[in-house]
Amino acid sequence: MLLVIGLGLVLHRPLSKVPENQLKFGVGVMLAGFGTFWVGEGIGLKWPGADAVILALIASFLVIAVVLVRVCRSRPATETQSSRTIKPGQLAPPSALAGVASELFGLFVDDGWLAAGLLIWVAAGWCFTAMIGLNHLMSSVLFAFGLFILLGVSSVRRARA
């Protein structure tokens, strides 16, 4: 605890100079790497290299994220919902209650297709491991590969929306 407090005091000034979006980007990449590792551990996967695979997962997510940022930046800017005006015959904007419900849903599942894909992929991986008898290394590799593909497809789909 004292080490963390000491690091916080020493690194406070340099970290306050890092732009907020870059800091969020880095934290998101690390959370995705750690989260993937922990989900795999939670469903009984044995990662090759044990805990060291977290570094490979973080590096993989970083590469994917940087590529997807470039894809999204190359797309032309779209009109935001707040800049639209309601014309006669159009539906009114959602009520305050619908807006709150949408925000709460977005806290847990921001992309319904991605969530459904992840659930299907995890269930299929569990079935393959249980029924076919895939070894833990192969099921770990398939899990990570499927997760990367689903995240990539979701990101490109959202960039085109």
Image (tube, rainbow, N blue to C red):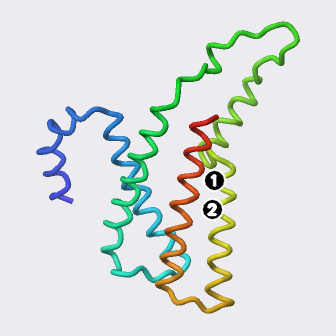
Q: Look at the numbered discs 2 and 1 and tell me whether their residues touch, using CB distance below 8 Å.
A: yes
Quadrant position of the C terminus in the picture = top right
- Furthest residue in direction top, as rendered: 88
Q: Is residue 31 above or below residue 73?
A: below
Q: Is residue 19 above or below residue 112?
A: above
From the viewer's perspective, tell me whether residue 14 is left or right of residue 104: left
Residue at 42% x, 79% y is: 47
Q: Which residue is mark 1?
A: 114
User: Residue 140: image x %, image y %?
Assistant: 49, 77
The residue tagged with tag 2: helix, strand or loop? helix
Quadrant position of the N terminus in the picture = bottom left
What amino acid is at disc 1?
Leu
Q: Which residue is mark 2?
A: 118
Figure quadrant of residue 49: bottom left
- Furthest residue in direction bottom, as rendered: 133
Q: Is residue 110 above or below residue 131?
A: above
What amino acid is at disc 2?
Leu
Residue at 54% x, 63% y is: 147
Figure quadrant of residue 17: top left
From the viewer's perspective, tell me whether residue 123 is left or right of residue 53: right
Distance from label 2 to label 1 (Cα)?
A: 6 Å
Decide which of 63, 104 is in the foreground and name it: 63
